[in-house]
Image: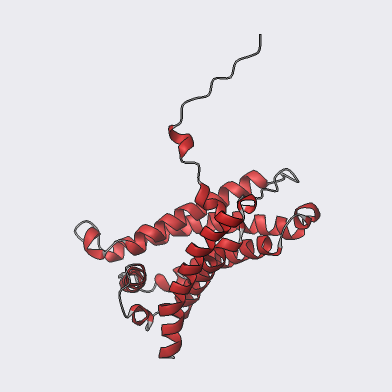
Amino acid sequence: MSYLNTLLFGLYPYLAGSVFLIGSLMRFDHGQYTWKTGSSQMLTSKNMRMASNLFHIGILVIFFGHLFGMLTPHWVYAPFISAGTKQVIAILVGGIAGVMCLVGGAMLAYRRLTNPRVKASSSTMDSFIIVLLVVQVTLGLLTIIPALSHLDGGVMLELAHWGQSIVFFQGGAAGYLDGVGLIYKLHILVGLTIVLVFPFTRLVHVWSVPFGYIARRYQLVRRRG
């Protein structure tokens, strides 16, 4: 079990991260015509706006919450907020964002799997990734149940130590998850799998966030004549 724990939570993260970075670079270099969102809104727009907004707002809050929550060392926020208080905030904010993402994602998945026109224009990976994302956010919401029984922030700190050890190449990362519950481990494994398959899905459009539009000058459109 110790070997399996090291394999899944000590080595698999680096395999997923390597495929994520190298695969994204290779796809951008060799498959730029496939580097797109592949929107199906023109095929049918029923409930599309609500589902898309719920999903994207929810997933952005979740992503940045995990990013800063896990990678920020405890000593940075310890003078201002306790680990337990941080966990309660994470449960409240993450729970709301998770429900938004789940509802929107489930609507999008149902639409992609049942609407004949959308299904016909979808690839296997299109369907797989939206279902996988719905599974992942469901697992994330399920972690709230055991989290409510230990509001001291202890498990949250162990998860954060694991994430920081992986990102900053510190040894013994898998050891932080030895005493962590199964639901947390499943949530991490599915998350790592999403990172692994990222370059082979439409998620690559995340790399092309048009930040330039924020600072660009307004375009003046005049009538002819």
From the viewer's perspective, is 28 left or right of 73? right
- Asked if residue 216 is positioned above or below residue 50 in the image, the reply reads above
Residue 144: percent from left, percent from top: 45, 68
Q: Quadrant of the C terminus?
A: top right
Left/right of residue 98 with respect to residue 110 in the rendered view: left
Would you say 44 lies left or right of 85 here? Answer: right
Q: Which residue is located at x 45 percent, y 57 percent? A: 63
x, y percentage for residue 112? 71, 57
In the picture, measured across the screen, residue 25 lies left or right of residue 69, that is right
Q: Nearer the viewer, residue 181 or 68?
A: 68
Picture residue at 61% right of the left edge, 48% below the top = 52
Q: Residue furthest front?
A: 30
Choose between 197 and 91: the one closer to the eye.
197
**What is the image's colouring?**
secondary structure
Q: Position of residue 29 (x, y in %)?
A: 56, 55
Query: In the image, what residue occupies the spot 41% across and 84% down?
Result: 6
Query: Total number of numbered labels?
Result: 0
- Residue at the right extreme, as displayed: 116
Please give the name of the residue rendered at 64% of the width and 50% of the height, measured from the top-left corner: 33
The answer to whether residue 119 of the structure is visible from this angle is yes
Q: Position of residue 158 (x, y in %)?
A: 33, 74
- The answer to whether residue 89 of the structure is visible from this angle is no
Quick check: 211 above or below 9?
A: above
Q: Quadrant of the N terminus?
A: bottom left
Q: Residue furthest left?
A: 79
181 over 56 or under it: above or below:
below
